[in-house]
Every structure is written in structure tokens, then in C-alpha cells.
Image (cartoon, rainbow, N blue to C red):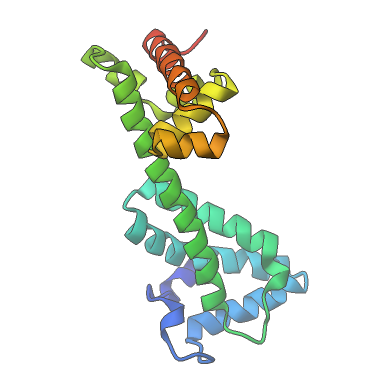
Amino acid sequence: MTGERSNLRLVAPAQHTEGEQTNYELDWSIMMARAQSGDGDAYRRLLTAVAPYLRARALARLGSPEEAEDAVQDTLITVHEVRQSYDPGRPFGPWLVAIANRRVADRLRRMRRRHKLSEAAADVVGNAPRRQDKTVLDNRALEAALDDLTPEQAQAIRLLRLEEQSLADAAAQTGRSIGALKAATHRALKALRRRLLEGPRP
């Protein structure tokens, strides 16, 4: 199956004239049409053929091999879920790229959120010893700590720290008073600091 990769050119299929297909994209379209008819071998060959293209495309936008690989897997899963929606009479490349772009955008949003989580963790722990940084600033640890907050506290942290809303905007969105949000944020930060500095529970 890997031999098909030699025919893959890492250019965007959507860049050619509408209705025109490159040779490799025509192969993809044929394999996808066969896959829709139940040809499992054609489907496996298709996924093997498109994976390097998706990987290169995702890496160019995400910069991280790990994130790019996750984006590739997300894209392939989506292709599998919506494969019957593909119209064999149209080029496969633009259809694939549209899915890939959405999955990469999802990853970018998650990366931005993790960055904000790391900033929030650094803000929460303040002057924690450097030896604890790796544990303290681990996004998964912060996510777990957030899960331990009350719904009101978690909402306050999400709106005021992660989404960086103003107190007035957060109050308008939640229907809670500014004082209540301030109190919830204060209690949440204390709980987060304690949990992060203590480390994960046994």
C-alpha cells in the first residue's frame, strides 16, 4: 500500500481549475467511489494514499508533528463518518481539503485553548518552585483541577480567565452579579492553586 505514496504530489488539489482533476486525484476519486460501493481494499488504499498529503498540509499549519498527526486522524475519522456524502461525479480533492481544513481549525482552537490554560496555570500557581513547573503547568493537570471546581467556579474561570471576558460581559451572559463572579473567581483560584501544587490525587 505504501508504494502509492510515490505518486503523491504535495500540492493542494483545490488549486487546479474546477472540474479538472490531477492524475492522483482521479485515482482518489475512483477509489472513493469504489469504497462507497463496499470495496474495502479500495478504501484502505485510499486512506493510505491521502494520509501523507494530509499530514504535510496539517504540519504546515500547525507546526507540531503530534498535533498534525492528530489532525490527520481526525480528518480520516470524519471522512469515514461522511463518506457516503461524497459525490463521485465531483473531484475528490476539494471535498477532502474542506474536511481537512475544518479539522485543522479545530486543532488550532484547541491549541489556543491549551495555551490559555497554561497561562492561567502560571497565573494561579504564582511563584511555585521551578522544579514543579512541568507538573504544575501540565494542561491535563489543569483540566482535571477545573473539573473539581463547582459549576459556578468553573464558569467564572472559563469566562473571565480563559475567554478573557470583562466582569460586566460575564455578568450579562450568566445573569449573576459582578460581586458573585468575583467571589466565585477568588474561591476557584484558591482551589486551583491548592490542587495544582499538591499534584494529582492518588
Return the residue nearer the eye: 10 or 156: 156
In this view, 42 is above or below 78? below
Determine the image quadrant of residue 174: top right
- The spot of residue 44 in percent (x, y) is 63, 63
Quadrant where the N terminus is found in the figure:
bottom right
Q: How many marks?
A: 0
Determine the image quadrant of residue 76: bottom right
Return the residue nearer the eye: 54 or 47: 54
Determine the image quadrant of residue 28: bottom right
Q: Identify the residue shown where x is 55% and y is 18%.
A: 148
Q: Is residue 1 visible?
A: no
> Viewed as shown, does residue 100 lie left or right of 134?
right
> Viewed as shown, does residue 162 lie left or right of 88?
left
- The spot of residue 154 in percent (x, y) is 52, 26
In this view, 163 is above or below 60? above
In this view, 115 is above or below 46? above
Q: Identify the residue shown where x is 62% and y is 59%.
A: 78
> Viewed as shown, does residue 97 lie left or right of 46?
left
In this view, 199 is above or below 185? above
Return the residue nearer the eye: 28 or 111: 111
Q: Is residue 6 visible?
A: yes
Q: Identify the residue shown where x is 28% and y is 20%.
A: 133
Q: Identify the residue shown where x is 48% and y is 49%.
A: 70
- The spot of residue 109 in percent (x, y) is 44, 49
- The spot of residue 65 in percent (x, y) is 36, 49
